[in-house]
């Protein structure tokens, strides 16, 4: 672990973000912390992946125009209702339709990929959208065990999670192009990347995507703190672990060339509608989708009509009640109050909102209402 820390804190600033550069956001309007977006490119019944991707572009454009800080997409596999299996491809598409909002992965599941491939993909994204790219990394597969085995071409799935710190070290070295002399990879370069600046006549951006660690437990919280990296916690599906993980991150934090103090965002499910009944109707679709996923029946996001008519078993109803207790929903004012309370209770430095619903219109409406509630800049 000390070797990883040296990778991230040694050397000059030419290949690294300055302290907090591209990491710390500024709160807009009356929000106490920066507001950002996590998008899953959800596909509802009766809709196509093409339509879902178009909706994601519209959400990115809307939230950029309203002053949200960043827009991330998450890697998932073998889930019919989630079309975000290829974050780098989606981010390239979003980058072509936006100008200012930060774009990133929330996250790329590092054990699923060779570190060099990720460095190349995100180096390419950085070249497409200089100074706007974040690289969020997770150590879970983002899917079930069988799919993870197919992705990794191995049944030894625990090796990927256990080797995460070493994989991270390798990825950071590729991003910074600083393998030591004698290392087997010393003559291998991630391109686009810093090697282009050292080639005759070469000119390369001074920036590279800042690395974030993502997690839903204490492992990545401690690792992020030890390395002085920013940390993103999945409150939206592991709410009971949020405060312990954030406390562990802050307690473990050691200043680095990247950050001089901890910086933690949390992902939170939130959906605003014109009235409480409509908000409840919309979030129930996500709850039913989660019931099906947890019981081995993943599918497209059900319509509000199907969710309302579904006959939940007592066990399913208990799960739904617990799930919805951690989804902030209601009118814009109610959602604003819930987000403010959560930020205060957790001390999070940033809130990353994910609005899961069947249709794109409901999600777009939600982000617009939340922006209005906080007095964010009017969209262009």
Image (spheres, helix red, strand yellow):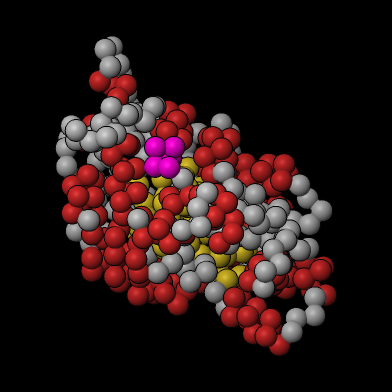
Q: Residue 240 occupies which quadrant of the picture?
A: bottom left
Is 267 drawn above or below residue 326 in the view shown? Answer: above
From the viewer's perspective, tell me whether residue 278 is left or right of residue 125: right
Q: Position of residue 320 (x, y in %)?
A: 65, 78
| Residue 149, picture quadrant | bottom right
Which residue: 26% across, 66% down? 250
Task: Tally the numbered discs.
Answer: 0
Q: Magenta residues: mostly which secondary structure?
A: helix
Q: Is residue 40 visible?
A: no
Task: Point out the stretch of residues depicted in magenta.
Answer: 114-118
Q: From the viewer's perspective, is 239 left or right of 303?
A: left
Residue at the location (63% across, 80% down)?
319
Q: Which residue lies furthest to the top in this view?
A: 201
Q: Is residue 115 magenta?
A: yes
Q: Is residue 125 left or right of residue 148?
A: left
- Residue visible at 50% across and 53% down in the picture: 154
The answer to whether any part of residue 51 appears in the image is yes
Q: Residue 303 or 363: which is nearer the viewer?
A: 303
**Residue 350: in magenta span:** no
Q: In which quarter of the image is residue 114?
A: top left
Q: In this view, does 195 lie above or below 185?
A: above
95 or 315, which is in the foreground? 315
Quarter of the image with the C terminus is top right
Q: Quadrant of the N terminus?
A: bottom left
Q: Position of residue 297 (x, y in %)?
A: 71, 67
Image coordinates for residue 348, horizontal then vertical, percent: 37, 65
């Amino acid at each position: 672990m000390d070797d990883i820390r040296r990778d991230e804190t040694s050397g000059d600033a030419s290949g690294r973000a300055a302290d907090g550069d591209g990491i710390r956001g500024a709160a807009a309007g009356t929000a106490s912390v920066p507001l950002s977006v996590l998008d899953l490119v959800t596909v509802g019944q009766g809709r196509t992946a093409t339509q879902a991707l178009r909706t994601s572009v519209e959400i990115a454009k809307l939230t950029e125009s309203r002053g949200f800080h960043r827009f991330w997409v998450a890697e998932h596999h073998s889930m019919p209702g989630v079309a975000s299996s290829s974050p780098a491809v989606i981010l390239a598409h979003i980058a072509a339709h936006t100008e200012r909002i930060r774009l990133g992965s929330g996250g790329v599941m590092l054990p699923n990929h060779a570190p060099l491939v990720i460095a190349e993909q995100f180096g390419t994204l950085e070249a497409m959208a200089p100074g706007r790219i974040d690289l969020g990394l997770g150590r879970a597969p983002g899917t079930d065990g069988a799919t993870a085995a197919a992705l990794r071409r191995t049944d030894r799935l625990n090796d990927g999670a256990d080797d995460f710190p070493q994989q991270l070290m390798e990825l950071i070295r590729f991003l910074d192009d600083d393998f030591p002399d004698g290392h087997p990879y010393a003559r291998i370069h991630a391109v686009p990347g810093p090697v282009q600046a050292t080639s005759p006549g070469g000119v390369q951006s001074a920036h590279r995507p800042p690395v974030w660690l993502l997690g839903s437990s204490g492992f990545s919280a401690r690792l992020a703190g030890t390395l002085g990296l920013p940390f993103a916690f999945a409150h939206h599906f592991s709410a009971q672990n949020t405060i312990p993980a954030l406390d562990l991150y802050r307690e473990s934090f050691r200043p680095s060339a990247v950050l001089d103090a901890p910086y933690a965002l949390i992902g939170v499910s939130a959906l605003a509608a014109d009235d409480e009944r409509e908000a409840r109707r919309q979030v129930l679709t996500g709850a039913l989708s989660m019931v099906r996923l947890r019981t081995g029946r993943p599918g497209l996001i059900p319509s509000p009509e199907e969710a309302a008519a579904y006959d939940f078993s007592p066990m399913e109803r208990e799960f739904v009640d617990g799930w919805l207790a951690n989804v902030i929903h209601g009118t814009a004012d109610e959602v604003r109050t819930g987000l403010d309370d959560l930020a205060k209770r957790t001390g999070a430095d940033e809130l990353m909102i994910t609005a899961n619903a069947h249709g794109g219109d409901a999600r777009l409406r939600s982000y617009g209402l939340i922006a209005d509630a906080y007095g964010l800049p009017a969209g262009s």
